[in-house]
Amino acid sequence: MISLTNVTKRYAAITALDDVSLEVSRGELYGLLGPNGAGKTTLMSLLVGHKHPDAGTITIGGVPMTSRNLDLRGEIGYVPQQIALYDELNAQENLSIFGSYYSLSGSLLRARIDEALEAVQLGDRRKDKVKAYSGGMKRRLNLAAALLHHPKVLLCDEPTVGVDPQSRNAIFDFLESLNAAGMTVVYTTHYMEEVERLCSRIGIIDHGRMIAEGTLNELLRLLPYEETISMRRNDATEANRSAFERFGVIREVNDAFELRPGKNVKMSDVIAAVEDWGIEYADIEWRKPTLEAVFLYKTGRSMRD
Amino acid sequence: MKKILILLRAHLTVFAADRVAVLLTFVIPVIMISLFGAIFGGSGRSQSSGIPLAFLNLSDAPVSRSIEGILDTLRTFRLIRTMKDENGKQVVFDTSSIQEFVKSGDAPAALVIPADAYTDTSIGFKICFYYDPRNEIEMQIVQGMLQKTIMEQIPQVFMESLNRRAKKALGPELSTAFNADIRKSVRQYFPGTTFDADTVRDGTGGMKPGDTSALAGADSSSVANGMGKMFREIVDFRSTQLVGAEIANPNATRSVGGWAMMFLLFTLSGVANALIDERRNAVFMRMLAAPFSRAHILASRYVFGTVLGTIQLVVMFIMGMLLFNVDILSNAGNLLLVIILSAAAATGFGMLIAAFSRTMAQASALGMLLILAMSAVGGAWFPTSIMPPYIQVLSKFSLVYWSISGFLSVLWAGATFVEILPILGVLTGIAAVVIGVSLWKFSRTNIL
Ligand SMILES: Nc1ncnc2c1ncn2[C@@H]1O[C@H](COP(=O)(O)OP(=O)(O)OP(=O)(O)O)[C@@H](O)[C@H]1O
Ligand SMILES: [Mg+2]
């Protein structure tokens, strides 16, 4: 559905996207994960046609994205990273302007506005001016505004910044239902949990380069270990620290040791050792690896740096 | 086209939501025209308090007294005859204290009719005018008005004195015969000429301009020159009057076009700011993501600016009618055409500014330059006819010049559609060129 081939985009000295290739299939919920300045917004603005690549090609539904291709834009919904609403108008007036951009009018427009407001749980605030909204409410309306014309492709650029967990879940449920109904979604974020929860496929982007791509499991399998065993630092664990090194790599993290067992280590051996050395189960935490670890492994940096 | 209308409706909705902006759109033209009208005395109803003029009459000739009487009745001047001395007592001026009075800035000018202003042997009439060249422009107005007043009042004085001189030189019989001969030859060469009574309607020959001098050393010969020119200007002035004779408020009618354009040019920088503001606004990204081309967006903004400018100009002219009796109804259709095309061209300049500036600050600086240059050169402040020839050539490149010409033709001369067609053509041409350049720039910079 969406295809980028060897796309490069520069701003003067900065290369915001460096030879990026990407395929998003129809009906996929694709997550683009990357830290600040990774190039996520740049990629989105190329997809939506605001900007044009310096090299490479972009097609949506097999049609090249050019500034002249206005019909193609009618198929795309775009949720900008910044709140893009008229402060002085209420929710309903905002949505009717944005709906009219896509030639919606009359009862169809009204129905779509009702539906969108319902989906982001703003139905009861529809007559309030946007300037009287909280940050999270603005975010939700910002998302609703992109859905009125039932686009085939939805591009969401960090749509949940500042949204409380409850509303975030409501947005996720909504996006999932849209996706289930056949909408292709590209979702950018710098929260790993979001793509882990939401996305069927994930691309990790850093400094304009696609550093890893695949399903969550595929990405986790890139790591040389499958889980992390964290042991609280105390007499028993201190004493056996070097003994654990035969199972894998030990790292000291604050008041704990982290053991990352090597690929061939049997978990039952580790458990047996823990019991033998009299370490309390309460002091041990077994953790599945995260995308954070993948990012760290690939870049040598933490996402949050 | 439909897309432009969609965007236009969106602009209007957003604009209408800003109640203050809407109010200002209508209130500002009203304030502006009231202000302009009050300043330039365009009002037929309100009266200015008059320019203070220190005055001393030392002559007891009847002419001098009649001039004093006339100056007294004129609303243009407020005669001051006394000043406070060091004891705080009001004392009458003398020839030196009246000059001190002007020097100390208590009055911009003084007029003294000396004791020998008019004697049986003099041909002309002598007055002394003192002024502070610090107020050069004001002084030119004052002098002009003084000269006009005096000249208008005393032609019979000259005639009288000429007659008297002739009588003296020729003797009473010869002089009557001379006058009769002159009448006869005038009739011979200008058949149909009539003479009232026995007065010879003569020109200004032999007129002595009187004695004027500037306190701070201004060149008095130029004043004398001006005096000589004055009579010609009076004649000129009268012939101008013939054209607009039936106009209710000539002053306001003549100036309203200039005021309107000045005002419109300021709204033009509003257009520029709106465009720049919009492209920094995140909502603009939605517009760009929607199925609109750059041309749709610019066109909708352009039409919006033109509609707003037209409404404002119409409000302004309506206020001109209500406050200053400017007759806008008898040629309303043509007036509206000039208004719309002027608004369209001004909006074009707004887009030009937006195209060439990246920030609001740049836009205001550019806008200011364009507004001031075009207004000054185009005749919004002073008529272009008093400008140096090369500036007058430049004027033709100013939108203001053509709009003012349009307004004057329509309001003053009551021009027909065919007559204003060339002006409408030029306005359209200006709009087209300016929009063309803006579009070219917009497409090059990629900022939109
Ligand atoms: N208009 C611009 N002019 C110059 N440089 C830009 C511009 N927009 C982005 N950049 C640069 O391009 C790089 C990528 O920016 P981009 O906005 O795409 O990052 P992002 O992944 O969206 O970051 P964030 O998570 O902070 O939104 C950054 O280094 C940024 O400084
Ligand atoms: Mg971004």
Image (cartoon, rainbow, N blue to C red):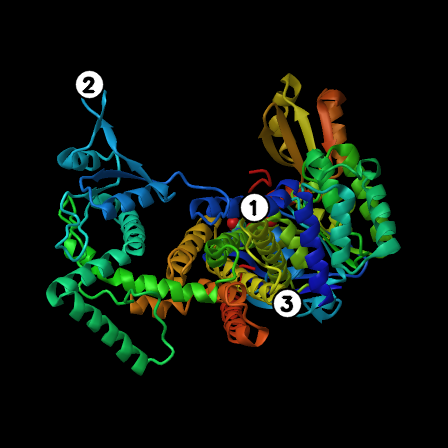
Circles 3 and 1 on the same chain = no
Secondary structure of the residue carrying tag 1 is helix
Q: Which of A248 and B284 is in front in this view?
A: B284
- Image quadrant holding the N terminus of chain B, namely bottom right
B99 left or right, relative to B4: left
Q: Residue B297 at what x, y percent from top left?
A: 63, 61
**Which residue matches tag 2?**
B87
**Which residue matches tag 3?**
A67
Q: Give the Cα separation between the discs numbered 3 and 1.
A: 44 Å
Circles 2 and 3 on the same chain = no
Q: Which numbered mark, 3 or 1, is in the foreground of this view?
A: 1
Query: Mark 1–mark 2 contact, CB under 8 Å?
Result: no
Q: Give the Cα separation between the discs numbered 2 and 3.
A: 85 Å
Q: Which amino acid does label 1 sit on?
A: Val
Chain where mark 2 sits: B
B283 left or right, relative to A127: left
Q: Residue A140 at what x, y percent from top left?
A: 75, 41
Chain where mark 3 sits: A
Q: Which numbered mark, 2 or 3, is in the foreground of this view?
A: 2
**Which residue matches tag 1?**
B30
Query: Is the distance from the Cβ of mark 1 to the nearest ligand 1 atom less than 8 Å?
Result: no
Chain where mark 1 sits: B
Query: Is the distance from the Cβ of mark 3 to the nearest ligand 1 atom less than 8 Å?
Result: no
